[in-house]
Image (cartoon, rainbow, N blue to C red):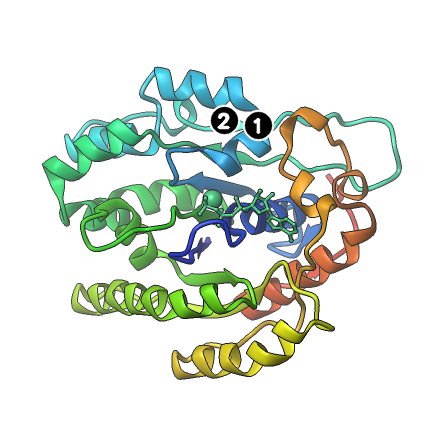
Amino acid sequence: MKSIAVFNNKGGVGKSTLTLLVADFFASTHVTIKDRPARVLVVDLDAQGSSATALVGPSAVADRQAAGRTVSGLLEKLMGRQAPSLADYLIPRQVRETGTRKIRLGKLWTLVSDGDGTMALEDRYRDRIAIALAERLKPMLEKEFDIVLFDLPANIDRRNYLAMAALGVADFILTPTEPTRMTINAMEKSFSIIRDAQGAARQAGRRVPKLVGVVLNKTDRRTRQYRLHARDIEQLAGANDSLVFRNFLPAAPTLASATDDSIGFETLRERYDSYYDHVRKVAKELAERCGYSVSARPPRS
Ligand SMILES: Nc1ncnc2c1ncn2[C@@H]1O[C@H](COP(=O)(O)OP(=O)(O)OP(=O)(O)O)[C@@H](O)[C@H]1O
Ligand SMILES: [Mg+2]
């Protein structure tokens, strides 16, 4: 299993959108892992539940939240030395097996969060959450999944033990950003939080998460703003042992509506329309950087 934390401390830069499209591509196309469809889990660590809602709909998310079947609920049980069943917490995305020849949105699973549960967990267990995540939850997920994506909230700091723990136990960290001055100004803070999480992993003797790259979102390379700021972003990424993805995502209403669960998308083409290739290229570049290969063929089974 490989895990990828999608993080930028600035709000609204596209963390949840990027999580959704990566999850879609990895779950729906042929990501080569032992020659079978990858089993993909999205752990939505933002209590707003944006990416989980986009994937499985608001009622499924609300039901799990009301029942306390959330990430924090699961960790509470694990830390209390109980043996919860992971299946009770997961929400599967329902898929139709028949019909179109186009690539259907593949099967995947989500785990949701709730604000009060997370706060209670953090008050009680503080930095022990990272140990529970690494030593109890991760081995549980390893049995069921090939790829785990953590969609992180914005505005976190050291007091957000759960989000910091997820950053520190992930194998890779992926950072969407926009080529605007305001977002660039805020990037140093994100890198500093990432360094904290990496430092904590190093100190605990765990594998240090690798910053796999910065993805430019809402980007038009013809604009003055892009030309002014592209080099700054490259340098900032480089100074943090990272790089900027060759592929980027344009600012497009289609990409904004891709997360709209009320539209009822069934295929990748329907969801991403004329931006399908942009999305495919970003997902493919990520897959390569994380060490697996992906083709645009649907999985065999
Ligand atoms: N490439 C894009 N083109 C147009 N709109 C986009 C694009 N990417 C994201 N958006 C829109 O920008 C807004 C913020 O995106 P998103 O929720 O993915 O960001 P976020 O970083 O997860 O935000 P938050 O910090 O609140 O979690 C949403 O309305 C989304 O639809
Ligand atoms: Mg979000």
Along the viewing direction, whichever of 160 and 250 lies nearer the viewer: 250
Disc sitting over residue 220 in the figure: none
Q: Position of residue 285 (x, y in %)?
A: 64, 67
Along the viewing direction, whichever of 186 and 262 lies nearer the viewer: 186
Amino acid type of the residue that numbered disc 2 sits on in the rendered structure: Ile
In primary-sequence order, the first of circles 2 and 1 is 1
Is 39 left, or right, of 144 in this rendering? right
Q: In the image, is the residue at mark 1 within 8 Å of ligand 2 by its beta carbon?
A: no
Q: Could you tell me which residue is drawn at 56 percent across and 70 percent down? A: 289
Disc sitting over residue 91 in the figure: 2
Disc sitting over residue 56 in the figure: 1
Label 2 crowd (10 A; few <14 / some 14-19 / many >=20): many
Q: Residue furthest left?
A: 124
Q: Position of residue 234 (x, y in %)?
A: 52, 80
Q: Position of residue 146 (x, y in %)?
A: 51, 49
Q: Position of residue 66 (x, y in %)?
A: 36, 16
Q: Residue furthest front?
A: 224
Label 1 crowd (10 A; few <14 / some 14-19 / many >=20): some
Q: Could you tell me which residue is drawn at 25 percent across and 28 percent down? A: 117
The answer, for residue 290, to whether it is visible in the render is: yes
Query: Hey, which quadrant is residue 228 in on the image?
Result: bottom right
Disc 2/disc 1 C-alpha distance (Å):
7 Å
Amino acid type of the residue that numbered disc 1 sits on in the rendered structure: Val
Q: Could you tell me which residue is drawn at 67 percent across and 49 percent down? A: 25
Q: Does the residue at mark 2 contact the one at mark 1 (Cβ under 8 Å)?
A: yes
Give SS at disc 2.
strand
Is 200 left, or right, of 111 in this rendering? left
Is 47 left, or right, of 33 in this rendering? left
Vertical relation: 265 (above or below) 198: above
